[in-house]
Image (cartoon, rainbow, N blue to C red):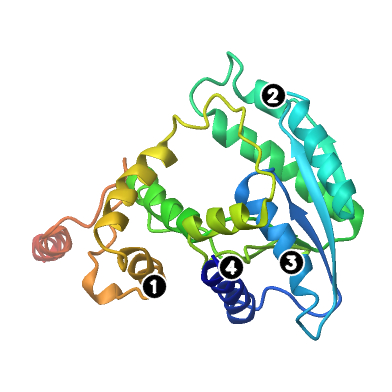
């Protein structure tokens, strides 16, 4: 148990330093959903203040999707007991995203609405940085989601600026595997709320997760290899970009045909 806790702290610190996520006197809004990742992130960022030579402020921000009132109430009680500065924002994003007019992709709409509210609240609080609890598995899953369903090689990044740098999203757990986070949460006895979302276990991300879990179980090095591959791209050994659907690409011989037509016109004009 002690090894896992120590390893999580080490990877958190490594990610913060390597990606330059937190600076002295930062004011950080921590997005707390109530799941294991965000709960541990909030706890770790405050605990880390005792061990580093810099100071920063934290505000826990929970955007309640509106599936029930119990989750937000339990989080508020925890924030008060632990002495965290916090904001609870109650919304109807979840039911709206799963309404009859939005059957195809409720997760996308709910996420977009939640992020908009979180950005607005961060501005109100004077917090130019927003810390989110995405872990290494989330980063890898997003990478494969974009490949399989978005037809592009892209993913989440540990540090991302929005609105010309007005808001910066940071992901301090980017190097930490999900299984380490769960174990440390259990070791610390942190409360972890179960998602009441009807799409929580039935979506494209879960399909990718199940696929990757099989690979991770067979070889413990696969997770780290994939993450390193995301920043070790050799374009020389990737195919040339295809034209988008509906666009005509440079067909073989098309340029030569145009040159032949030009020669014939010149000969006919003589």
Q: Which residue is mark 3?
A: 45
Q: Which residue is mark 2?
A: 67
Instruction: Tell which tag, 2 or 4, sits nearer the viewer.
Output: 4
Q: Residue at x 52, y 65 (%)?
A: 176
Answer with the quarter of the image where residue 111 lies.
top right
Q: Residue at x 76, y 39 (%)?
A: 63
Q: Residue furthest top?
A: 100
Of the pair 235 and 45, the residue shown nearer to us: 45
Going from the N terminus, do you reach mark 2 or mark 4 first? Answer: 4
Of the pair 161 and 207, the residue shown nearer to us: 207
Q: Which residue is mark 4?
A: 5
Question: Can you give x and y, in whole percent of width and height, for residue 166 in the image?
Answer: 78, 63
Instruction: Tell which tag, 2 or 1, sits nearer the viewer.
Output: 2
Going from the N terminus, do you reach mark 2 or mark 3 first? Answer: 3
Q: Are marks 2 and 4 in contact (CB under 8 Å)?
A: no
Of the pair 208 and 270, the residue shown nearer to us: 208
Q: Residue at x 63, y 33 (%)?
A: 110
Above or below, comparing residue 200 to residue 166 in the picture: above
Above or below, comparing residue 130 to residue 51 in the picture: above
Few, some or many C-alpha atoms within 10 Å of disc 2 (few <14, some 14-19, many ≥20)? some
Q: What separation in Å lies between label 1 and label 4 (alpha carbons)?
A: 23 Å
Q: What separation in Å lies between label 2 and label 3 (alpha carbons)?
A: 28 Å
Of the pair 167 and 243, the residue shown nearer to us: 167
């Amino acid at each position: 148990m002690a090894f896992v806790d120590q390893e999580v702290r080490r990877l958190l610190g490594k990610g913060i330093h390597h990606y330059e996520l937190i600076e002295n006197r930062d004011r950080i809004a921590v997005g707390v959903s109530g799941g294991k990742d965000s709960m541990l992130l909030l706890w770790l960022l405050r605990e880390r203040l005792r061990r580093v030579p810099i100071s920063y402020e934290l505000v826990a921000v929970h955007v309640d999707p509106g599936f029930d009132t119990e989750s937000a109430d339990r989080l508020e009680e925890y924030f008060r007991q632990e002495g965290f500065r916090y904001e609870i924002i109650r919304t109807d994003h979840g039911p709206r995203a799963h309404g009859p007019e939005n059957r195809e992709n409720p997760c996308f709409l709910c996420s977009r609405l939640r992020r908009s509210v979180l950005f607005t609240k961060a501005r109100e609080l004077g917090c130019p940085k927003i810390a989110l609890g995405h872990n290494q598995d989330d980063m890898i899953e997003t990478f494969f989601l974009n490949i399989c369903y978005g037809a592009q090689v892209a993913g989440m990044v540990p540090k991302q600026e929005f609105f010309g740098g007005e808001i910066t999203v940071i992901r301090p757990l980017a190097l930490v595997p999900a299984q380490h986070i769960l174990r440390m949460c259990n070791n610390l006895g942190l409360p972890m709320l179960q998602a009441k979302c009807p799409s929580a276990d039935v979506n494209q991300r879960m399909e990718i997760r199940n696929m990757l879990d099989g690979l991770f179980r067979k070889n413990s090095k696969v997770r780290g290899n994939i993450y390193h591959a995301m920043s070790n791209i050799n374009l020389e050994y990737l195919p040339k970009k295809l034209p988008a659907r509906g666009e005509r690409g440079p067909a073989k011989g098309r340029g030569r045909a145009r040159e032949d037509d030009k020669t014939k016109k010149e000969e006919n004009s003589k």
